[in-house]
Amino acid sequence: MTILIIFGISGNLSQKKVLPALYALYSNNLLPKNFKIIGLSRREITIDQIFANSDVPKHNQSQYDDFKKIFQIQQFDSSDNQAYKNLYQKLQTIINNQSLKLNLLFYLSIPPEIFGTIITKLGSNKLNQFNDSIQTRLLVEKPFGHDLTSAQQLIKLTNQYFVDQQIFRIDHYLAKETVQNILIFRRYNPLFQTAWNNQHIASIEINTLESIDIEGRVDFYEHTGALRDQIQSHLFQLLTVTTMTLPTDLNNNDSIHLARHSLLANIQPMNNQKTLAANTFRAQYEGYKEEVNNLNSTTETFASIQLEIQNSIWKGVPIRLTTGKALNEKKSEIIINFSAVNEQHTNQLTFRLQPNEGIDICLSVKKPGLDQKIQTTTMDFSYKNSFSHHYQPDPYEKVLLDSFRGDNNLFATSNEIIDSWRILQPIIDYWQNHPENLKQYPKGKAKQGILC
């Protein structure tokens, strides 16, 4: 039996991402047997009200109604210790009335600033571990911490009640089909396997660009910003998958985590203002200050940083991570720029995460005709076209299913979290001390290249 307890069941993340993903798993008979969901909400709300505001599709009314039957909704004040005692008793009653092995998952679909409070109260009320026959796990959304110090403190606090194997820090980017395919692509294509180093690759670009603005998420975004929201989590994870040394066994989770940690450990933080000024850029879209009702806001909605991995494989290869909101396009991609054999001709490999997931290879070819004219053309692989009849799960379906199974491959460890904040902390400090460096750009019109 598996019980998923969702803190913040009525929140935007649950309604837009988590509930639709759970419904998709339910519709495809992929949920564990004897699966129950307990949704916790600070305000009094019914299951019908929650689903009315969600993105769960209603194409099959019978299935839709059956799905709602696995839910129990409970009003819950996360700051009230008695609420946790009541939850303990509720779960204990369920446990006592069934003899099956139990998986218990606590999903913190809530603002990150209250993670510590809930984790502490879960632990102090013994909700972290009932007995040896019950597998208890903690699912946590990004960002995990606000800077290096807060991340260290939160990890120390969490480790008082949960071991690392119980903690599943969600980053849905790692569950995208193209991202999962990068390791396979690197391992099983000899043409690229031998060229995956600084002898053949000139630079790497990793971009997550959005045309939407902050969409009313004022409190979250003003406290977070582009660097913390995207680069510390999504882009760093994409960086590790792209550049880490491949372990012998790609199915060994410990080896995968060790390889990611080793890669991040070889990135040295920028240690002086000249380097920081030359290799970091931030900007804010026009009208953001009025949108968040803070005319003194220095929160960036666009961020771009350039890093270098200090090991023998990648030393000398610039790696640029860029993210932004309210731009003139929406796309997420990893671009591998190969070294040119002469000034005109080179190759470029692009992993497209969105839209239209797939892989592009840019090649130089002879243009048809009598003359020896060369032009650039693209070989295009698209998941949509090549696997149109295959089930392609949403990334949240994948991370949820893996958490139910206890497979932590796609989830960051404490070491990876600390490494990412260690690298970014000098940038955070530099930007905080130099607010004059924040640039402005027109909402919905700016191009990535113009900004950075």
Image (cartoon, rainbow, N blue to C red):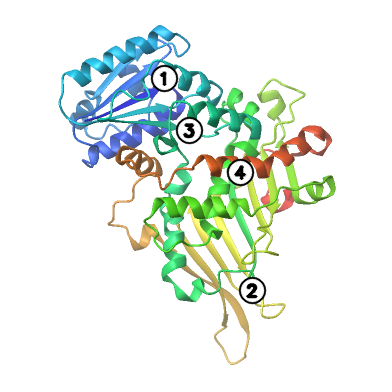
Residue at image position (43%, 11%) is 77
Q: Report helix, strand or loop for mark 2.
A: loop
Q: Is residue 10 above or below residue 355?
A: above
Where does residue 86 sit, x and y in percent of width and height?
33, 10
In this rendering, does residue 295 appear at all?
yes
Instruction: Tell me how far mark 4 sits from mark 2, CA to CA.
Output: 26 Å
Would you name the residue on which mark 4 appears? 420
Instruction: Tell me how far mark 3 sits from mark 1, CA to CA.
Output: 17 Å
Relative to residue 23, is residue 379 drawn left or right?
A: right
Which quarter shows the N terminus?
top left
Q: In the rendered image, which quarter is residue 229 located in?
A: top right
Give the mark, 3 or 4, whose residue is nearer the N terminus.
3
Instruction: Tell me how far mark 4 sits from mark 1, CA to CA.
Output: 27 Å
Q: In the rendered image, which quarter is residue 346 located in?
A: bottom right
Q: Report helix, strand or loop for mark 1.
A: helix
Q: Is residue 12 above or below residue 328?
A: above
Would you name the residue on which mark 3 appears? 141
Where does residue 339 sit, x and y in percent of width and height?
65, 73
- Say which amino acid is labelled 1: Leu
Q: Report helix, strand or loop for mark 3.
A: loop
Front residue of 442 and 15 = 15
Residue at image position (62%, 31%) is 146
**Label 3 Cα crowd, 10 Å radius (few <14 / some 14-19 / many 20+):** some
Give the mark, 2 or 1, whose residue is nearer the N terminus.
1
Residue at image position (67%, 42%) is 424
Give the mark, 4 or 2, whose residue is nearer the N terminus.
2
Give the mark, 4 or 1, whose residue is nearer the N terminus.
1
Front residue of 184 and 51 = 184
Q: Which mark is residue 32?
A: none
Would you name the residue on which mark 1 appears? 122
Instruction: Tell me how far mark 3 sits from mark 4, CA to CA.
Output: 16 Å
